[in-house]
Amino acid sequence: MAKASPAQRRGGRPTQVEAAALHQRLREAAVRIFLENGYDATTMVAIADAAGIAKPTLYARYPDKRAVFLDVIPWAFSRAVPVDADDTVDKKDLRAALIAIGQGALRHALDPDIVQLHRIARTEAHRFPEFALSADSLGWARRQQQVMDLLRQHVAAGAIDVDDIELAAEHFLAMVEVLPARLADFGLYRSRTEERRRLLHAVDLFLRGILPR
């Protein structure tokens, strides 16, 4: 049997690689349009145009705008929140490791794309209450796990005394990033020097609560 020509293949179903590339392009375009226009002013036509695809192609993947939003915004969060892993930091030095994690948390909280994503998630919380909660937790859960792993290492070594590691990690991140993130929602940013001063204070305060007495 003769092999299909390139022209014939182009007219058939896309390959898995082509389909994945199309899906990513569509998602990136949809996120951009939602952030630029907001949910109400965004249309399926605008998303299709931004992605450079035909409307039927978009509707083949998503039945409506709500389905697009529920897919692409969490996806955008998941891409924007890599766990910071600084291999130059000695994890045996608990203070230095906490500072490194805190710096990563602040970079995430103050990133302009993250600020915009949080903004639209909160604005549309009345339509998607379950989504607003999960959007906030996407980055938080990864960083909390990072802190928990660090604390477990030092508990096992007898260096610190922590009854509830999960709660302690949550409190640490709350001290470090919650207020800067809320200020950023309103376009308010502290200087780098001031953010570092507050980070070091939070780390030292946290350590005083978990070091053996």
Image (cartoon, grey):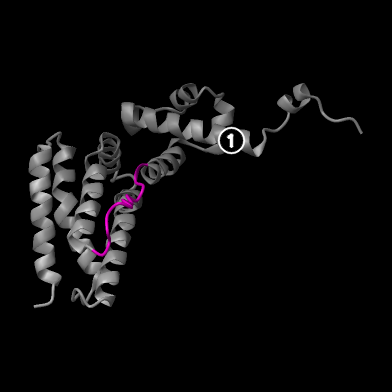
Residue at horizontal 29 percent and vertical 45 percent from the top = 125
Magenta-drawn segment = 80-92
Q: Nearer the viewer, residue 167 or 129?
A: 167
Residue 85 lies within the magenta run:
yes
Residue at horizontal 76 percent and vertical 24 percent from the top = 6
Assign the C terminus to one quadrant of the image.
bottom left
Residue at horizontal 19 percent and vertical 54 percent from the top = 99
Assign the N terminus to one quadrant of the image.
top right
Q: Is residue 5 above or below residue 157?
A: above
User: In which image quadrant can residue 109 be found?
Assistant: top left
Q: Nearer the viewer, residue 181 or 70?
A: 181
Amino acid type of the residue tagged 1 in the rendering: Ala
Mark 1 sits on what residue?
Answer: 60
Residue 8 percent location from the top left of the image: 78, 25
Q: Is residue 190 above or below residue 152?
A: above
Report the predominant secondary structure element of the magenta stretch. Answer: loop
Residue 146 placement, left or right of 17: left
Q: Residues within 10 Å of mark 1 (few under 14, many from 20)?
A: few
Quick one: which residue is furthest to the right in this view? 1
Residue 190 placement, left or right of 127: left
Residue at horizontal 28 percent and vertical 45 percent from the top = 126
